[in-house]
Image: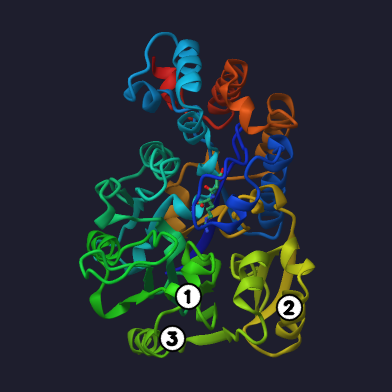
Amino acid sequence: MLAREANYDGLIGPTHNYGGLSAGNLASAKNKGLIAAPRAAALQGLEKMKLMADAGLVQGVLPPQARPNLEEIRRMGFSGSDENVLASAWQANPVLVRNMCSASSMWAANAATVSPSADCADGRLHLTPANLSTMLHRSIEHEQTGRALQAAFPDENHAVVHDALPMQSTYADEGAANHVRLSASQGAQGVELFVYGRDALSGQPITKFPARQTLQASHIIAARHGLGASRTVFAKQSAKAIDAGAFHNDVVCVGTLQCLFYHEYAFADTGQTLAHISTAAEGLFEPQFVEVSNKDVPIKDAISAYLFNSMLVQMPGDNRLTLVAPTETHDNPYTKAYCDKLVASNGPIGTVKYVDVRQSMRNGGGPACLRLRVVLSEVEQVAANQKMLLDEHLYAELTAWVKKHYRTELAPDDLGDPALMGESFTALDVLTQIMGLGGDFYPFQRD
Ligand code: SUG
């Protein structure tokens, strides 16, 4: 079956800021309180999307979520008009409001876990929105994410959008950031690798920083998607990686087609993980493992420069893969030297392109965090919502929309400003028209 990998990027929302909300995410902690630049952030994201679309890849757009999340704030006991709810919550508990204002849905790699139809028993594409239950500001995303994914893949004959897993720590799930699919070609049956940070039922010691993905969540998703047991691998992330700041596996590992590119410290038991992948791939393809030693790139540098949070893609017409890395990877001597060596070798990765997503990077979100990969067969691509796919026209409209509606600067204390809420909701209302999402896509449109 012919299929292509589409990248659906989270469009960066008007409340992008540095709240210091994610324990264990070193960039988020370090940059807490900085003045953010929402307009520049959104334009950087759009620029990356355009680069991919211009290269001939299928590029989708997931709309930002409405923030502040007034429904959640009301659930906490604040009432009255929207302005009153925001003002009274801000006065009582600004930290709560900061959590309810995060633009974190931009990191679409955490939106859902996606299994292409070639891997699923019923021959349909399966998507499970991540409950993101570990972090308060992210735990409020999954419902609207489900709505966005339904809008993107509306035909039930081709796609199933599940509910998120229950909101309980045993089922903590962070989506595709802890999931890798390898295959001979995008349309062929593949091997799905689920990487978990903790087995919630084992009673084993926990890590210093939160391990956000559980084995139990990964098991349930694989079962729901109807994946073949012999083609599915569950691997434990190393505690060393988590405690060094790899709050998701995609901070130390990325893979596509036959290639798995990872840091020496990514997995708790690398030998066993690779052996399981090789066994699962038998008869389908020969995996190519590209391991980066801690000597070549110390884990600290791998994480600060986000070498592995790059997109690994097959550009049309190329034999070897391209790594789309953040400029921080270029600026770090270890990761830059490694990339130069990678390209000069005759391994599976032949090109490294650097993109500027610095605004997102300061919150720990690299090029790979900003996109959700969805492998689509030809019919599935036709059945997908075409208005959510980026072309020249949509790019021009979105760029103009950002320039018109977004602030150039935003400090964490601006989040209590009712004017910001008004501007954001107005912008998102216009966005639903641009992207054809209907007049009831956002909660504030349904009031
Ligand atoms: O969940 N940062 C995000 C970054 C997500 C990156 N995604 C992947 N690796 N796939 C997180 O930690 C910081 C928000 C703040 O502090 O304002 C934040 O949520």
Q: Name the amino acid type tagged 1.
A: Lys
Q: Is residue 219 left or right of residue 277?
A: left
Disc ID at residue 202: none
* Residue highlighted by disc 3: 270
For marks 1 and 2 on the same chain, the one whose residue lies earlier in the sequence: 1
Q: Nearer the viewer, residue 230 or 17?
A: 17
Q: Is residue 337 left or right of residue 430?
A: right
* SS at badge 2: helix
Q: Are marks 1 and 2 in contact (CB under 8 Å)?
A: no
Is residue 364 shown above or below 192?
above
Q: Nearer the viewer, residue 267 or 431?
A: 267
- Mark 3 and mark 2: Cα distance apart in space: 22 Å
* SS at badge 1: helix
Within 10 Å of the Cα at label 3, are there few (<14), some (14-19), or many (20+) other Cα atoms? some
Q: Name the amino acid type tagged 2.
A: Tyr
Q: Residue at x 59, y 65 (%)?
A: 309
For marks 3 and 2 on the same chain, the one whose residue lies earlier in the sequence: 3
